[in-house]
Image: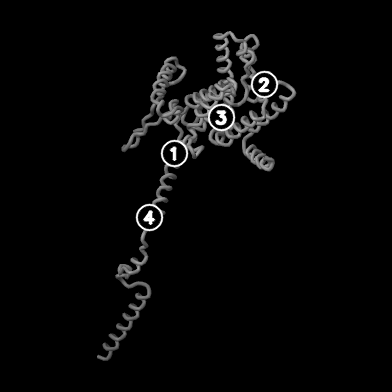
Amino acid sequence: MNRYLPVARQHFLAAVASTSVVVKAVCATVLLLYCLSFLVDTVHRLGVTPGYLFPPNFWVWTLVTHAVAENHIWDVCISLGTVIVAGRLLEPLWGALELLIFFAVINVSVGILGGLSYLLTYVATFNLDYLFTVRIHGMLGFCGGVLVALKQTMGDSVVIKVPQVQMKDVPMMILVIISVLRLTTLLSSSMLSSYGYGVLTSWVYLRFYQKHSRGRGDMSDHFAFATFFPEILQPLMSVVANVIYSVLVKIKICKKTVKRYDVGAPSSITISLPGTDPQDAERRRQLALKALNERLKRVEDQAAWPSMDEDEKDDGSDVPLLPGGDGDDLGAEEHETGMGAFKVLSSDS
């Protein structure tokens, strides 16, 4: 184990060095607060406590700081890994500023929604533990948001080959695993709520509000809410999601999808949705071409094509109909000799 630690440390430092200032600052903050946790209860001071979040205490700063407060080394590893993956895979597509906005939106939303959930649970049960014992902290919510963003950008990528698991299936798969572990009391309820609200808020933000070159959001079919569920449940979830979306449109929380028709080309009509990224379409075309090339290569390896070199050599079509090259020079010499003989005969006569 000890011989692998220097290699892992080297790869970690190389990955951090290739990221932006935003990623480096977040990683440094997580490590610094973890070191301070041995002296001060940073989770209590910086984590979201539902009873202190709302008046009269109103600890609103915890909405920003709870994501970087950790008190276990394995939690620190998950947080650092999540931030580095976001910096390596999402930051080149979005930019450092958009990644920082995404980080802030997810964590603030997780803190607010988690605090409200425990407040409503206290109202239903009158158990003060839900207000003053629960601590919402760590980057599990941001981890869920990063997985949703990776589903959007590289959902067709295979994460596990046996059994085959694609990136688009990972967010809900991890949610199911965390739910099972919560039922067995191996994980706290705050971890389940953080991850669940991270997945939900990141999808809402990326689906309707994220700014990019084609407007706001991503209204493509492969990023619909129903695609998070197994295929057998997708028709039912599509109906539920459409009803909720219609209600949100009526109360003006979400905007209605507008389709644009490009009739400039006489042969076809192009329909485009706001938010569909041309980079995603190009990525899908490249994947299709790669699959096609692999199939053609397998077919070429299986079939033995006959060589046509010998047939071409025996074919009389290679013989030129008109003289060329050296034959032209020989014809020119014979023509000159004939003309000289004709002149001699003419002079003798």
**Label pair 2/3, CB-CB below 8 angstroms:** no
Residue at (42, 23) in percent of width and height: 237
> Which tag, 2 or 3, sits closer to the chain's start?
2
Q: Nearer the viewer, residue 70 or 60?
A: 70
Q: Indicate left or right for 142 with 223 as reference.
A: right
Q: Amino acid at mark 3?
A: Glu
- Measure the alpha-carbon separation of dots 2 and 1: 43 Å
Tag in front: 4 or 1: 4
Residue 132, image x, y percentages: 64, 13
Q: Amino acid at mark 2?
A: Val
Mark 1 Cα within 10 Å, few/some/many (few <14, many 20+)? some
Residue labelled with disc 2: 43
Q: Nearer the viewer, residue 61 or 75?
A: 75
> Which tag, 4 or 1, sits closer to the chain's start?
1
Residue labelled with disc 3: 98
SS under mark 1: helix
| Identity of the residue furthest to the front in this view | 184
> Which tag, 2 or 1, sits closer to the chain's start?
2
> Which tag, 3 or 1, sits closer to the chain's start?
3
Residue labelled with disc 4: 303
Mark 2 Cα within 10 Å, few/some/many (few <14, many 20+)? many
- Measure the alpha-carbon separation of dots 4 and 3: 51 Å
Q: Nearer the viewer, residue 100 or 270?
A: 100
**Label pair 2/4, CB-CB below 8 angstroms:** no
